[in-house]
Amino acid sequence: MKEYIFDLTVVALLIIGLTATLGVFTNGLGERLFGGRKKNEFVDQCAKFQTGWNAVGGKKK
């Protein structure tokens, strides 16, 4: 029974890890191939929105 649980855990971790890795890879590939001119639309909009905000946290030098 211990071997079965061990095997099940190993297979589950491999499936979850492979799925997560392929998801990140596929997302990056899709953005590069099908992103077009608006690849950074949301990043640029966030940067524009946050212009003039005060920095929070950290230590002042």
Image (tube, rainbow, N blue to C red):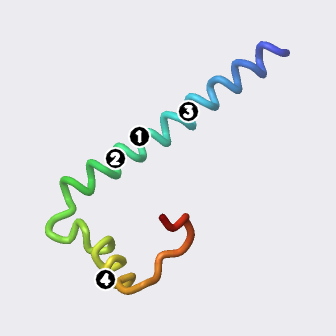
Q: Quick one: label 3 or label 1, which is nearer the N terminus?
A: 3
Q: Quick one: label 3 or label 4, which is nearer the N terminus?
A: 3
| Secondary-structure class at tag 3 | helix
Q: CA distance from mark 2 to mark 4?
A: 28 Å
Provide residue 47's location: percent of width, then percent of height.
Answer: 33, 77
Q: Residues within 10 Å of mark 2 (few under 14, many from 20)?
A: few
- Name the amino acid type tagged 1: Leu
Provide residue 6's location: percent of width, then percent of height.
Answer: 74, 19
Q: Residues within 10 Å of mark 3 (few under 14, many from 20)?
A: few
Name the residue carrying label 1.
Answer: 22
- Name the amino acid type tagged 3: Ile
Say left or right for 20 vs 11. Answer: left
Name the residue carrying label 3.
Answer: 15
Q: Which mark is residue 26?
A: 2
Q: Quick one: label 2 or label 4, which is nearer the N terminus?
A: 2
Is disc 1 in contact with disc 2, using a CB cutoff of under 8 Å?
A: yes
- Name the amino acid type tagged 2: Thr
- Name the amino acid type tagged 4: Lys
Which residue is located at x 41 percent, y 40 percent? Answer: 22
Which residue is located at x 57 percent, y 37 percent? Answer: 16
Q: Which mark is residue 3?
A: none
Q: Which mark is residue 48?
A: 4
